[in-house]
Amino acid sequence: MLHKTRGIVFKTTDYSESSVVVQIFTEKFGLQSYIINGARKPKAKIGRNMLQPLSLVDMVVYHKTTGNIQRIAELKNSPLLQTIPYDVIKSCLAMFLNEVLYKAIKQQTADENSFDFIFNAIELLDNATHGLANFHLIFLIQLTRYLGFYPHGTQVENANYFDMKNGVFSPYKPDSASYLSPPHTSNFYNLLKSGFGHIDQIKLSNDERRYLINKLLEYYAMHIEGFGNIRSHEVLEEVLG
């Protein structure tokens, strides 16, 4: 049976002499693997260049609930990314976000809320003209809302610490070794509350940005089984620095 669905490309792997297997986070079916025969041929109907990381696509797919690898009848880039592939900072941001998403998104069932958030964030990045230095920080914080470990509540008065194990702000130093302390707590809270709408109002030094991204990745690793290490942020830090 054929289904129409939007998708976000996560990873493409060569398979046989001319084919690829591509993992796509779909609106209707969650994360799925698709084999595309002939994608590596020069005149392929669905070419490898259409399957770059975080490409946004409209698809018509065959879907079997019992199958591990699905097939695609039609695919087109929609919308076609205009700046991410050609802007050094944006492409490094996309590489980093893609690595995080690939390790964080596991579900093979529909999750339209998380799909919409990621899809819209990629469009926002493609259209952005300012505020790029903090984009990945806000993205990672907001994504936790859909992954199940969004920070609880608000920063209460005199809450100098953020307890990463329990995901709460606290006036007292947590018992665990994983926490944020001043001034990092207030910077984290400002990012949490600003969202993408006020991204250019958050002023952080390069050192503070590096510290927070490392702590955010630690936060992810604590709450996502098998998350492992992320390496692409080192390249991103060099570009942003």
Image: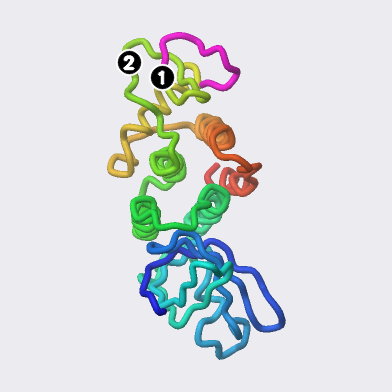
Residue on which the image places disc 1: 169
**176 inside magenta stretch:** yes
Three-letter amino acid code of the residue under disc 1 = Phe
Residue on which the image places disc 2: 156
Task: Return the residue found at the far bottom.
Answer: 43
Task: Return the residue found at the far left.
Answer: 197
Q: Main secondary structure of the magenta part?
A: loop
Can you give x and y, in whole percent of width and height, for residue 228 in the image? 65, 42
* The magenta segment: 170-179
Q: Tell me if I can see residue 186 in this picture.
A: yes
Looking at the rendered structure, the secondary structure element under dot 1 is strand
Q: Is residue 85 left or right of residue 121?
A: right
Task: Return the residue found at the far front.
Answer: 66
Three-letter amino acid code of the residue under disc 2 = Val
Can you give x and y, in whole percent of width and height, for residue 148 in the image? 43, 38
**190 inside magenta stretch:** no
Q: Residue at x 55, y 67 (%)?
A: 33
Q: Residue at x 61, y 72 (%)?
A: 21
Task: Return the residue found at the far right.
Answer: 17
